[in-house]
Image (tube, rainbow, N blue to C red):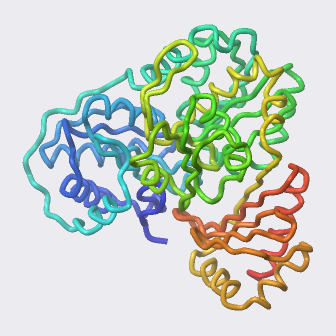
Amino acid sequence: MAPKFGTSGLRGLVVELTPDLVADHIRAFVAACPMGTGLWVGRDLRPSSPDLAAVVLAAAQAEGLATVDAGDVPTPALALAAMNAGAAAVMITGSHIPADRNGLKFYMPTGEISKADEAAILAALGRAPAGVMGPQTVTCTTAGADWVARYVTAYGPAALAGLKIGVWSHSAVSRDLLLATVVALGGKAVELGRSGIFIPVDTEAVAPEARAAIAGWAADLGLDAVISTDGDGDRPLLADATGRVIVGDVLGQITAASLGAEVVVTPVSSNTGAEAGGKFARVIRTKIGSPFVIAGMEGQHRVAGYEANGGFLLGFDAQGPAGPLPPLATRDSLLPLIAPLALAKAAGGLAALVASEPARFTAADRLENTPIEASRALLAAFDADPAKLAAFMAPMGETVVATDRTDGLRYTLASERILHMRPSGNAPEFRLYVEAESPAIAAQMLDKGFAALRAAFA
């Protein structure tokens, strides 16, 4: 599949992200969007990321821009540093997808690009190089430390005191910063599973072998929690003392409430606990992807956004337990890790904190290597033929009572459970999300749903 824009920027196979294609997109970005004081560039730990970063820096320099190389740094740390400098940014990352793929995430000085900005970039492709060289690239080594300091200021050096926290490092570019954060907030950090090769970790669909490893570490080492992120550090992973992974939308609703958000914006794939909990004056539902969440946040008072993958967006000047917490309206992983951990101390642990939330539980996974065209055709068939949909639901013992077409097909069932299907916006994957009244039932629904999908695609 040729490189294309999805919900997280440009994505594609590494072999198709040629220097000419990447440079063309950078020239288009410069032409279509404000650059402010210049362009900052960061990268994840994929083998292909340094070479792609070099192409981006060279292309931006050839457009006359001042360029800053932030090195190996999490996406939210790069965005924070660039925004504070009044600059645009490009992050080289494929996020959670395998290492044979990579991508570019684009940021203006005000934050993530919108879908309108994406269209403007695509319309500007094919420009000739400006041929006016900018100054020599400057190196920045403090973006990651500044990201950590933001939360130490807000939560204080004793926020995690008394907690023994495992940090699953794998190949996340955030791994050293996660360790530093735990220590800076007064906790004891135990590193787990550092890898020298890239491991694609999807925090929204944690692999069974990863869940087993997390549970084993928690039991064997007597941990209060295990934390991690995806490859570029903008999606959190948090597990309790039993090793049970806490889904990202629950982290989002806990974090938003703890900061006093009055309005939350979240995609239709998130669970309905935000509405059921009654803690927010308004809940706005969007299509899946941070650009849609950011668009929904515009003009709202004391607003926060979050996604089912756990990425959290803060849209107002909040106050942490120890100090101020300014807005950061881009997908972030540290805040939805720190806020629940800090609250868990008084709640008797993470499990008790989660148990106090509405009993709505989600599970999600994906069918990889599923062509988007096939996925769309299957959904169109379900939407057009009630008999075909009924036959699909029959093995699950469910019937549909309402359909939401905001993003894919999201069915409310007679049992008051939810089944949501959609093609991925940035990879050849078919996503399935379920919501039920217990984790066990959600897991059973997911298994039955995938069995039915495999039969439908056969």
Q: Nearer the viewer, residue 356 or 73?
A: 356
Residue drawn where x is 64% and y is 50% of the image? 308
Residue 429 x %, y %: 63, 66
Residue drawn at x 54%, y 59% is 286
User: Given the current orientation, which residue lies at the most extreme left position?
Assistant: 132
Q: Specify whether residue 75 is in view.
A: no
Closer to the camera in the image, 131 or 442: 442
Q: In the rendered image, which quarter is residue 279 located in?
A: top right
Front in this rendered view, residue 173 or 184: 184
Q: Residue at horizontal 32%, vertical 66%? A: 119
Q: Residue at x 80, y 42 (%)?
A: 211
359 to 381, vertically: above or below: above
x, y percentage for residue 280? 61, 42
Q: Is residue 100 above or below residue 34?
A: below
Q: Nearer the viewer, residue 177 or 296?
A: 296
Q: Is 329 on the left or on the right of 274, as rendered?
A: left
The C terminus: image quadrant: bottom right
Percent position of residue 189, x then y:
69, 16
Q: Is residue 428 above or below residue 167?
A: below
